[in-house]
Amino acid sequence: VGSVELTKLDSATKATLAGATFELQDKEGNTLQTDLKTDENGVLKVTDLVPGSYQFVETSAPTGYKLDNSPVSFEIVAGETDQVVKVTKENTLEVGSVELTKLDSATKATLAGATFELQDKEGNTLQTGLTTDENGVLKVTDLVPGTYQFVETKAPIGYELDTTPVSFEIVAGETDQIVKVTKENTLVPPTPVPPTPVPPTPLPPVPYEPTVPPTKPEVPVTPKKTENSEDSPKTTPIRITQSLPKTGDTNSFAGLGVILIALSLSGLLLKRK
């Protein structure tokens, strides 16, 4: 009799996987043994097999992995039973999906046209050009368990770009549930319109008032005394009307004589002055 050893591996990392369950069948598919489990080293072993063709069929996958029930065939060869037949079976992690909905931060309305890229938790880009549809939704499938993040690369028209990562996790054993996340955007603030300047109210014209220099009080000027000053007696001109004496008019000559005498006296007075 011979023996066989099966090792269970992760298809990506080649790490060994405990907890996978198999049954042993003959080449016609008849069950020979059940509930054969890989141990902590990812190995199961069956002994006491007579020469012939056999197959392992997986009945339960390790937690977080897809069940793969495709048979793993092997043969126990007569005359070589001292050698352990070794086979491997790989499993792929169960994959999950995520759905992101883009919203207006104020109205909560959905927004189409936002573009994202998908990154792992270290920020390495996994997918690009992921754009929300007319319902504001984008969906990514076939994600193995792990931590991821969406980073916005283009905002919807009229909205501010927000590159803050949106983190989420695909949990092993819960991949049948769609992970749902949201991302809100804020409208670009409108450009302030400068106020229309108000023309100043025109002031009424101030009437022109010429500047008049102050008038100095007139100081009376005392005139210098002259020969014709006020202290000198004014000579009143005497108008002489000469009339020819009439015949026999003796009074006319007498009056004329008086006038001549008066003129002489006035002249003397002036000379004395």
Image (cartoon, rainbow, N blue to C red):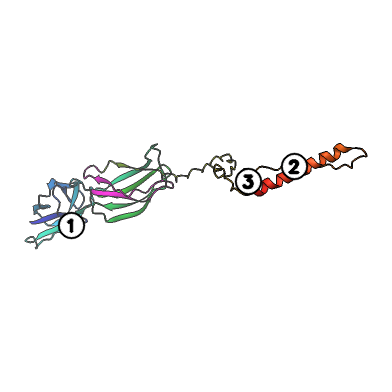
Q: Secondary structure at mark 1?
A: loop
Q: Earlier in the sequence, mark 2 or mark 1?
A: 1
Q: Which residue bears the numbered disc 2?
A: 262
Q: Earlier in the sequence, mark 1 or mark 3?
A: 1
- Relative to 9, say whether 252 is above or below: above
Left or right, residue 40 beside residue 189: left
Mark 3 burial class by Cα count in 10 Å: few <14, some 14-19, many 20+:
few
Q: Find out whether the residues at labels 2 and 3 contact each other: C-beta distance under 8 Å.
A: no
Q: Quadrant of residue 204?
A: top right
Q: Residue at x 63, y 46 (%)?
A: 229
Q: CA distance from mark 1 to mark 3?
A: 149 Å
Left or right, residue 82 beside residue 113: left
The label shown at residue 69 is: none
State yes or no: residue 256 in magenta.
no
Residue 245 image position (x, y, % from top left): 89, 41
Residue 201 image position (x, y, % from top left): 55, 39
Residue 3 image position (x, y, % from top left): 9, 56
Magenta stretch: give its range.
146-174
Q: CA distance from mark 2 to mark 1?
A: 170 Å
Q: Which residue bears the numbered disc 3?
A: 229
Residue type (three-letter) at the residue carrying disc 3: Ser
